[in-house]
Image: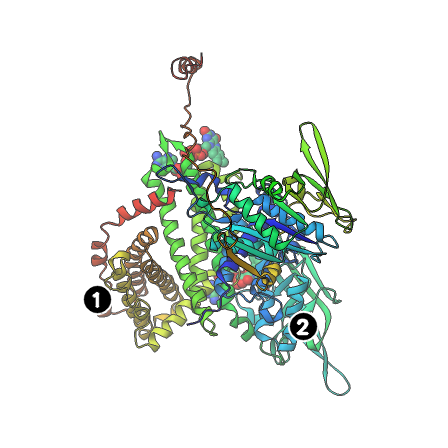
Amino acid sequence: MKILVPMKRVADPDNANKVKISPDGTKVTSEGLEAKPNPFDEYAVETALRILEDGVGSGNLRGEVVVVTVGGDDTVRQVRQCLAMGADRGIIVQGDDDALDSTIVANVLAKIVEKEQPNLIIAGKQAVDGDSNQVAQALAEILGWPQATFAGKVEVPQDLSSATVTREVDGGAAKVKVQLPAVISVDLRIVSPTGVQNNVAAGKDYQDGPRYASLKGIMKAKKKKVDTMTIADLGVDQTLKVRSVSFTAPPQRSAGVIVETVEELVAKLRDEAKVL
Amino acid sequence: MELKRLDNDDLLTILGTLNDFAERELPFDKRTKWDEEDICPEDIVKTMLSEDVGLHLVFIPEEYGGLGGGAYDVYRLSCEFAKKDVGVATSMLAVALGTDPIRVGCTPEQKEKWMTRIAEEGLIVAYGVTEPEAGSNVESLKTKAERIIDENGNITHYKLNGVKQFISNGGIANLYTILAKAPDGPTFFVVERETEGIEPGKQEEKHGIRLSNTTQVILEDCIIPAENIVGTKEGQGIKHSNEVFGFTRLMVAAFGLGGGLSALEKAIAYSKERKQFGDYLYKKQGYTHKLIVPNAVRLAAAQAYIEYVAGLLDSSEEDRQIEGSVAKFFSTESGNKAAEDAIQAHGGYGYCKEYEVEKIKRDVRILTIYEGTSEIQQNIIGVFRMRQVVKGKGKFLVNMAEGLEGNDTVNGTLAAKAAAFLDAAAYAAFKNKLSREQHIIFELATSIAEVETAIQLCKAAAEGDDKLKQAEARIWAAEVAVSAPTRMLKAFKQSGKVSDELMKELSIKADIAGSIDAQSGVLEDMNLVAELLVQD
Ligand SMILES: Cc1cc2nc3c(=O)[nH]c(=O)nc-3n(C[C@H](O)[C@H](O)[C@H](O)COP(=O)(O)OP(=O)(O)OC[C@H]3O[C@@H](n4cnc5c(N)ncnc54)[C@H](O)[C@@H]3O)c2cc1C
Ligand SMILES: Cc1cc2nc3c(=O)[nH]c(=O)nc-3n(C[C@H](O)[C@H](O)[C@H](O)COP(=O)(O)OP(=O)(O)OC[C@H]3O[C@@H](n4cnc5c(N)ncnc54)[C@H](O)[C@@H]3O)c2cc1C
């Protein structure tokens, strides 16, 4: 059993307010901000590990978890972080973030699938920077594989032949069963203590949230293989289908004013805000 | 020069793990509650040392299952940890301290046994040196280790009796390294918690770091196998405890820096949201130049010095006791001051709990006390640096300041001048037997710490193109060029033991008027620092 997890590097989402727009307005830059694996992709790594583990938190996998990223050279740190969590191997397909769109990424991943022949692809539901929410779906389409998106719960039988995926919908939950190979995209709930049921590691619950890149894992990750290749190596057409025309920052919120009296408030609402 | 350091990517990943760990396990509301209720979150300490996290592996050598990080790595980890919570960080410090006698004193076989267990089982370790009557003066310890001898005359066991005071992790440890007096002198022993005859006392009710467990540890006919001695012979304990100071004091220095920086960051953030007299507090020069900028400057100096010491420790085997003392003394005092000022900067809200600076202030307060009080550090710095100056025939600090003369980007000339003066002052103190006055030694130590940190900050700032650091270096060099000579001349005069002639000679060397002349531009630099600090 082999699970492929695509991972995108993003600017630290805790500092999202510090992202800037380039002077010409065509790009969002996150210079000086710390880079992290996209949180939903960390959940995907966690999901893959939980599916393959033979006991809760055992780290013994019944197969291989391969992390693949499309991005700059320096994404190696985020890939290693996933390896420190317990993934087995990494692949970096070099590409400049500005010269990528969801279609190119999905096509690159399809080529990797061709090479790696995974049984399952688990992706984050979306990247927290671009919020495109397209790669998993496009990839399933290209591969002709079944897809189950926004998984909040995944259950697999012991023989890993299929996956039953639950997603939250308005006022309830929708359950779908897919035969493997398949593409699953995951939502936050997947990393709740009972988000993944693999019918092997029964009895004990996981902690809430993805596991840490433990220091022991960081040590082990040093010995794990990370292959690097280029988009051209894979023969993928690099013409952008989507081009960003311009970005605008949300309007600056102006400071509030404190009014002394009700009369003043009414006057301001009428004359300045013009809501009365 | 090859540095013993972790790969930078690995270090950053580790700091990321620390961050994730603190975010999840140590959120503000929980820490506030534990602080109020005086609770050490033992489970979280266990998680920190478990396979799932394992922060202690940074300071355990690779051959025993750790990462074998250097002083720089330990400094970075300690500084970041202290920004989260000095109490929980202290728990990690105690593990490091407790492991240290094993690291420096044990045979390879003993290390294989203990270190591997600490690394892999995530044992909570405690360092048992202090006693009710042996604090700063460790050598007055009373805890005894009696030999138990078999019929062939071999030592098979030791029997320990005594009381250890203020032991961090005392009530939650699995393993203790205990300093006790054996027939041949003070010796470290490793004692497992399960051993009969070792019991923690009740938790101390502390002013700060209330998330850290501190207790007495009582040894009553505690019999341990002879092989639990650290090393192969008795009497090495004081040597072992002295050998690790460069390293452990650097850790506490890093706590001072981290604690101070988090207080400062909170004050800066507050000044950007609080309006009084029609405008934000950060726009008021009196406010920034009293409560923000001087702390940023001192913490920058502390950081430069810590990084300098880490570099020394990572590039040679030599322990750096004096430098470790300067780092600890200066950085923890600066951290204290920054936290104190952060309360002031928050006005009445700083005095209450919700902005956290009140807790930070209580937490960092321990740092000038444990691991050798500030006064003990001053003694070490004053006495031993003075001896080095004498050995160098009146030259030590000038050598350290080499290359700064003439560098106006960082006010290097002023730092170099202060260095030359302090060399002369230290030499004069020795020659005139003033070092018998502890007051003079302490004033000398304070001045040395100021000038050496200025030298290192100037050097660090001269290397890159960091405008903030350069302005901070200029401010600090200008400050100490006046404060250090003024303090020393005053102390010399106070002693009544310095001839008019020597006073005159030293005054000329001090050239305080010249240094005052060089102050123009400092206010502008303070404006610049304030401006850069409030920028995102
Ligand atoms: C929260 C906490 C945690 C601790 N953790 C540990 C631990 O894990 N393991 C451990 O072994 N110890 C630990 N300690 C003990 C700590 O290291 C001692 O408290 C410290 O060394 C000071 O000793 P003392 O408290 O006996 O003070 P004293 O030595 O009695 O000092 C009292 C005052 O006199 C000053 N003084 C002492 N000697 C001189 C001198 N020669 N010249 C001038 N002034 C002097 C001191 O600077 C201080 O201001 C801890 C203490 C605390 C409070
Ligand atoms: C325990 C306690 C008891 C109190 N009791 C009473 C009481 O009984 N009755 C009552 O009326 N009030 C009381 N107060 C309120 C107290 O007087 C105010 O907290 C105090 O005046 C400071 O105001 P502030 O807290 O809003 O701080 P701020 O005014 O916001 O000040 C924050 C910081 O900015 C500085 N600052 C403010 N303006 C300037 C400026 N122009 N230039 C430079 N720096 C500036 C301040 O010095 C301070 O360091 C109490 C407060 C406390 C904490």
Q: Does the residue labelled 1 lie within 8 Å of ligand 1?
A: no
Q: Residue B504 carries which label?
A: 1
* Residue type pointed to by label 1: Lys
Q: Residue B229 carries which label?
A: none
Instruction: Specify the subunit that label 1 lies on.
Output: B
Classify residue B152 as left or right of residue B213: right
Q: Check the picture and name the quadrant holding the N terminus of chain B.
A: bottom left
Q: How crowded is mark 2: few (under 14 residues within 10 Å), some or many (20 or more)?
A: few
Q: Can residue B368 be seen in this view?
A: no
Position in image of residue B482 (x %, y %): 28, 57
- Total tally of numbered discs in the picture: 2
Secondary structure state at the residue bearing disc 1:
helix
Q: How crowded is mark 1: few (under 14 residues within 10 Å), some or many (20 or more)?
A: few
Position in image of residue B157 (x %, y %): 72, 77
Secondary structure state at the residue bearing disc 2:
helix
Q: Name the residue under label 2.
A: B113
Q: Is mark 2 within 8 Å of ligand 1?
A: no
Q: Check the picture and name the quadrant holding the C terminus of chain B.
A: top left
Instruction: Specify the subunit that label 2 lies on.
Output: B
* Residue type pointed to by label 2: Lys
Position in image of residue B289 (x %, y %): 33, 44
Please tell me which of labels 2 and 1 falls first in the chain.
2
Residue A263 found in image quarter = top left
A79, B328: nearer the viewer: A79
Q: Residue at x 58, y 69 (%)?
A: B62
Circle nearer the viewer, 2 or 1: 2
User: As displayed, is residue B534 above or below residue A217?
Assistant: above
Query: Extreme bottom residue here?
Result: B152
B476, B15: nearer the viewer: B15
